[in-house]
Amino acid sequence: MASDKPSTGIIPFAKATEIKRIDANTYQANLVDSFCIGAVPNGGYVASCILQAAILHGSSRSRSRSPSNPQPHVLNAHFEYLNRTEVGPATIIIEDVKPGRQLTTLHATLYQGGGSVQISSSSPEATRGKKRLTAYLVMTNLSSLQGISLDTQFLLVPPPLTLTKPNFGLLKENKDPSWTNIQLPPGFSYIRALQNIKFYIPRQGQVRKSIIDLWICLASGERFTDATLGYVSDCWPYVVEAYRPRDEKENEGAAFRHDAKHWYPTVVMNVEQKKAAPKEGWEWLRMRVSSKEVRGGRFDLEVLVMDEMGELVVVSNHVGLVLGSERNLAGRAKGEMKGQSRL
């Protein structure tokens, strides 16, 4: 089982999401420890592995069947998290549900716990392992889609307290007058996935506890690509942490203790990509993460991702849970191995 101690090195995102094609519908990934939360790989990171496989699948399909109309972009993806994933090999099976000239619908399932990785889509499910994650994806070419475009005058409402765009040169040195890097508390050390992104928040604070405005960049120095957007959409599901008591004195009347350690597993995630990444990728992305209600250990999450120009890149919505970290770090029980989820 993976350790809850922080990893010592950063694995480049491209390496961590490297996909090997086994046959026309079967792909192999290898989930790495440095993108884990406790013992479980971050859900957005695993989604990015599926996105990478879908992009590879769509590109190879386009070349063989419709070279004049490639579909290299994931217009929309819907992810259902069925069981905890783990560090190690994972098999992704992709089915062409509805091929089309403009839009193609794919169904992808990620398996772990099977035997040899040299399997095919015709193999029985027992050899693939257990279903961990399933997704429907709509593939297209965002560069060639035609139709009306309207200026909706989209703005963040309520506006952030800090409206000033950062000086990115100063921001890298944490010297920007309006934005500063997040200082993670010691209790976050088991969330190793956070070491892969640098997070910056307004020095003046957030407009309200349930809304978090951020600028982010990849710690490896890489640029954000289309495949990274699953990870980006799930990199900061920590709205609940804004309500954490600061110390023992504030515990009375609070929803949870100041030293409580939580895990925020994603149950469902939808990712709609509004804009294709430029060839060189994005160095910086802006995010707003917000929750409308936290009730009974469940919470909704809306994630808006924008580029440096303020144009929307992603609209993502989640259903998440608030669980004790022991649910993450506990070993897999016999019942779970027989098909019962421990979420």
Image (cartoon, rainbow, N blue to C red):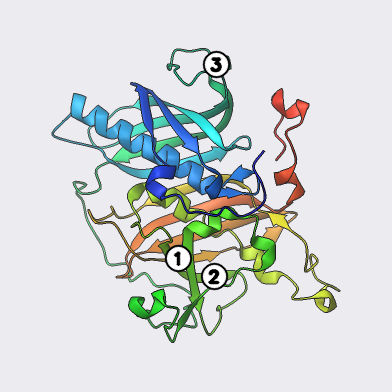
Give x and y (percent) for residue 134: 51, 33
Q: Quadrant of residue 278?
A: bottom left
Q: Secondary structure at mark 3?
A: helix
Q: Residues within 10 Å of mark 1 (few under 14, many from 20)?
A: many
Specify whether 185 is left or right of 115: right
In this view of the protein, which residue sits in the foreground, 182 or 254? Answer: 182
Disc 1 is placed on an element classified as strand
- The amino acid sitting under disc 2 is Ile
Instruction: Say if mark 1 contacts mark 2, CB within 8 Å.
Output: yes
x, y percent for residue 79: 51, 40
Say what amino acid the circle numbered 1 marks.
Answer: Met
Q: Quadrant of the C terminus?
A: top right
Looking at this view, name the residue that lies furthest to the front. 8
Residue 287's disc is 1
Q: Does residue 77 show up?
A: no
Choose top left, top right, bottom left or bottom right for residue 224.
bottom left
Residue that mark 2 sits on = 212
In the rendered image, residue 270, in percent from the top left (x then y), is placed at 48, 47
Kindly indicate whether the residue at mark 1 contacts the one at mark 3 (C-beta within 8 angstroms).
no
Residue at x 44% of width, y 18% of height: 118
Neighbour tally class for label 3: few under 14, some 14-19, many 20 plus, Cα within 10 Å: some
Which residue is outermost to the right? Answer: 252
Quarter in which the N terminus is drawn: top right
Could you give the CA–CA distance between mark 3 and mark 1, rounded to whole angstroms?
A: 40 Å
Q: Which is nearer the N-term, disc 1 or disc 2?
A: 2
| Residue behind mark 3 | 127
Residue ID at (62%, 43%): 40
Q: Nearer the viewer, residue 209 or 333?
A: 333
Lower position in the chain sequence, tag 3 or tag 2: 3
Above or below, 235 relative to 174: above
Please determine whether, in this image, residue 82 is positioned above or below residue 93: below
| Structural distance between the alpha carbons of marks 1 and 2 | 8 Å
